[in-house]
Amino acid sequence: MTSLQNQIVLITGASSGIGTACAKIFASAGAKLILAARRLERLQEIADALSKDLATETYLLQLDVRDRSAVESAISTLPPSWSDIDILINNAGLSRGLDKLHAGDFQNWEEMIDTNVKGLLYVTRYVVPGMVSRGRGHVVNLGSTAGHQTYPGGNVYCATKAAVKALSEGLKQDLLGTPIRVTSVDPGMVETEFSEVRFHGDRDRAKQVYQGVKPLTPEDVADVIFFCTTRSPHVNINEVILMPVDQASATLVHRREN
């Protein structure tokens, strides 16, 4: 495994799923981790496990990326030994509901837009200037196949992920002439808390999403993110779209009989 000894990696949405999987794989490479999420107790559990197993140095941020002033404060008050962020993984994101647009829930819309788009913008805005001034850095945005192809009921969620795709492309253009790299990693079906969050804790409905399918795991996605961030410095992997073998598009999925 490529060594990232003493590189500082900031992961948002680090308390579960792809964020936690990223924490583990980057810790294995010797990176120092800034773990950010709303659930501080969960972050502490992850940090304790990484410290015990890998002697990983961690810095925890209880942070809601939707709160711009909180994001500004969190980044601007990092201790000097943690402020030079080398890799930013904008992983915080969610989906709410599968309503038709004309019957949509306004609170669901606002939560998705505020987290998936504005939250990503806030964190990027406060982290990337430091990368530019230091002349090094890599931003990884977690997109989705939903940003490439809309599916029934996905309307606003798909729009937020299409925005992530556009923002990733725009950031890459804006950073042209600097050594900063920008990558969008866009998974299809991944079995995380995603569907449980979408259906507001309805676990039975969430399980049906993956019934008869072997979906991607958070570790699969983290492995791709790690690969992208460990290429030669002159190589930028702009975008990766990955799906399980059982999926061919946003709506075309092969389900086996139980």
Image (tube, rainbow, N blue to C red):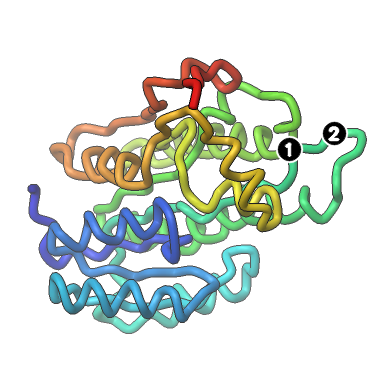
Label 2, label 1: how far apart the Cα atoms are: 8 Å
Q: Dot 1 corresponds to which residue? A: 156
Give the residue at x 60% y 37%: 208
| Residue 113 visible somewhere in the drawing | no
Tell me the element at label 2.
Answer: helix
Percent from the top left, x then y, of residue 18? 40, 51
| Residue 193 visible somewhere in the drawing | yes
Tell me the element at label 1.
Answer: helix
Percent from the top left, x then y, of residue 48? 27, 79
Give the crowd class for mark 2: few <14, some 14-19, many >=20 residues within 10 Å: few
Percent from the top left, x then y, of residue 238? 36, 30
Quarter residue 181 falls in: top left
Give the residue at x 44% y 69%: 36
Front-lying residue, 238 or 16: 16
As drawn, the label of residue 101 is 2
Quarter residue 66 falls in: bottom right
Left or right? Give the position of 88 relative to 104.
Answer: left
Percent from the top left, x then y, of residue 235? 21, 32
Front-lying residue, 158 or 133: 158
Residue type at mark 2: give it.
Leu
Left or right? Give the position of 234 relative to 95.
Answer: left
| Farthest-out residue, right | 102
Left or right? Give the position of 65 relative to 198.
Answer: left
Question: Sequence order check: which comes first, mark 2 or mark 1?
Answer: 2
Quick check: 221 above or below 149?
A: below
As drawn, the label of residue 45 is none
Give the residue at x 61% y 45%: 206
Front-lying residue, 114 or 196: 196
Give the residue at x 17% y 38%: 231
Quick check: 123 above or below 142?
A: below
Residue type at mark 1: give it.
Val
* Dot 2 and dot 1 residues touching (CB under 8 Å): yes
